[in-house]
Amino acid sequence: MTASTAVASASTTRAAAPGTYLNPVLDAGPEVDHGDPFVLEFLGEYFLYYSGPTSIAVWRSSDLVTWEPAGTALTGAPAGHWAEVELWAPEVVYRDGEFVMYVAATRRGGPARTSGKAAGADGGDDEQRRQGVARSRSPLGPFVWDDTPLVDEWSIDAHPFLDDDGSEWLFYNVRNEETRHADGTLGCGNVVDRVLADGRLAGEPVPVAYPSEPWEAHPEGGQYWNEAPFTMKRHGRYYQMYSGGFFGGDGYSLGVTVADSVTGPWTKASRHPIFTSGAHVSGPGHHCVTVAPDGVTPYAVYHGYVGDGYGRKVHADPLFWAGDGPQLGLGSTRPTSPSGLPQALPPKPVYDADVAPFHLRAWMEGAVTLVDGVGVALDGPVPCLVEAAYDGEALTVRRNGAVVARRQGPARPQLHCGTVLHSALTSRLDVDAEHVLAAGEEVVRAWGGGLPVSCSLAVSGRVRVELGDEVLEVDAAPDAYELVTLSSPAGAAQLRVTAVGPARVADVVLAARAA
């Protein structure tokens, strides 16, 4: 939500054993605040941006955990412009050869305000704070401001979202009379509006997450926050993860609200919050979700405080789906917390030719490509993202994020025509269905590979999980899902889940991994 102070010349991280990493993945020094991080993947590289008082820094990485400074992406506009200072919460989307940065800013003219362990506002006029846009032809910038703001009221924390049908939406944060808590206390909340073909908003924002829970308040009272939206779609439903509470304190956490339509109605999940302070990291929040180098495994990148030190540092944890919503990091129950322990590096692409399901992510240029015979129009000399996912029964093809084709029957990860600029091919099966089982009933998923395979699934009740030579007995609560993970170093013919008693199984994910 607020500003960083300065950019160090290099990332400083603790030493980790080979094949692992330790959070934070970006800590540029004890005087630096890296609030509101956002990561863009483009042509196989990652670009990280975060808030700044007068500029937005950009860092780059090839693996999501080792970051190097890459300069300044955006600076505050000259005097008299609406976006002079306090450049907050940048998110960048790539469209047709252009990089569009959604970022909030304001004019000079306000007092400096402290914000606990985070950098506060520094001389900007809070009443003139607006959500706007800057543009560039490179992810490194320089980005150039639009002349006028996108939203003509107090607004921050924009999050662009592309639906399966290609429609574009903007989630963002506002503070007005409607976003007050029911008791009248000041608060801010998230709304969503449609993005028109010319980039303007339709002007019909609808509520998504407004203050309602005790944990969303300042610990000393006086204000509530629902902010920092990030929206994903699964099971045909929309899940918005948002940050609640005071960003400058330890109570800052992540919550979830859910809807069957992008325009709602939205309902907050019953288990709140889902990601909170832990023993090593406090105040985790304002996250984004990107994919690992394998092109498909989701990772959440967020800020948090390490110990009692000043400034929010950048952290990365795997994101799982756990039956009734997303979960950050490992743990059998929610809320989870940043562990502070070594984690396996984000996975690289691994293709096992003996496994039918796959996920292919390819940046391409040219007029057209064929994905195992399915034609996809490209963008000529401008990079175009083509994704193909096969679950063993049907092939789904996306172009720049939107679904353009579905085909039943066998499929192969083959591209014909067009030039591949970067690609990642991984053997992966993702089954988002829920299975309700009686004692003795099974869920079986064929695999067939000889390379190491990892598995995650959500379980409620008692089950026996078999993956290759690995066997796991799970006794989960009957009224709530728990995340279960296991792996088989020698591969597996299949995954078999057998109900010992009444049980539910959901969100089965299998993926080939490197030996």
Image (tube, grey):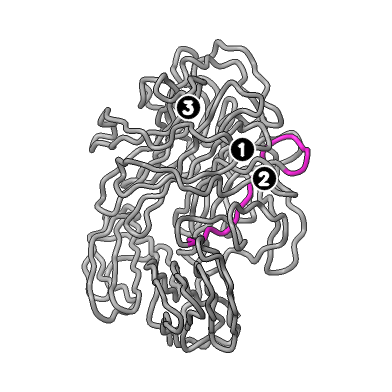
- Please state, as top left, top right, bottom left or bottom right, where the N terminus lies in the image: top right
Q: What residue is at 29 percent from the left and 67 percent from the top?
A: 396
Q: Secondary structure at mark 1?
A: loop
- The local crowd at label 1, few if under 14, some if 14 to 19, many if 20 or more residues have their Cα within 10 Å, is many
Q: What residue is at 58 percent from the left and 74 percent from the top?
A: 474
Pointer 2 or 1: first along the chain: 1
- Res 462 quadrant in image: bottom right
Residue 354 % position (x, y) = 43, 87
The answer for how far apart the CA atoms under marks 2 and 1 are is 8 Å
Q: Which mark is residue 121?
A: none
Q: Nearer the viewer, residue 76 or 336?
A: 336
Q: Which mark is residue 252?
A: 1
Residue 230 % position (x, y) = 45, 44
Q: Secondary structure at mark 2?
A: loop
Pointer 3 or 2: first along the chain: 3
Please, what is the three-letter code of the amino acid marked with disc 2? Ser
Residue at image mark 2: 277
Residue at image mark 3: 188
- Res 284 quadrant in image: top right
Q: Are marks 3 and 2 in contact (CB under 8 Å)?
A: no
* Magenta residues, start to end: 306-322
Q: Are marks 2 and 1 in contact (CB under 8 Å)?
A: yes
Please, what is the three-letter code of the amino acid marked with disc 3? Cys
Lateral position of residue 447 relative to residue 85, left or right: left
Please, what is the three-letter code of the amino acid marked with disc 1? Tyr
Q: What residue is at 70 percent from the left and 28 percent from the top?
A: 116
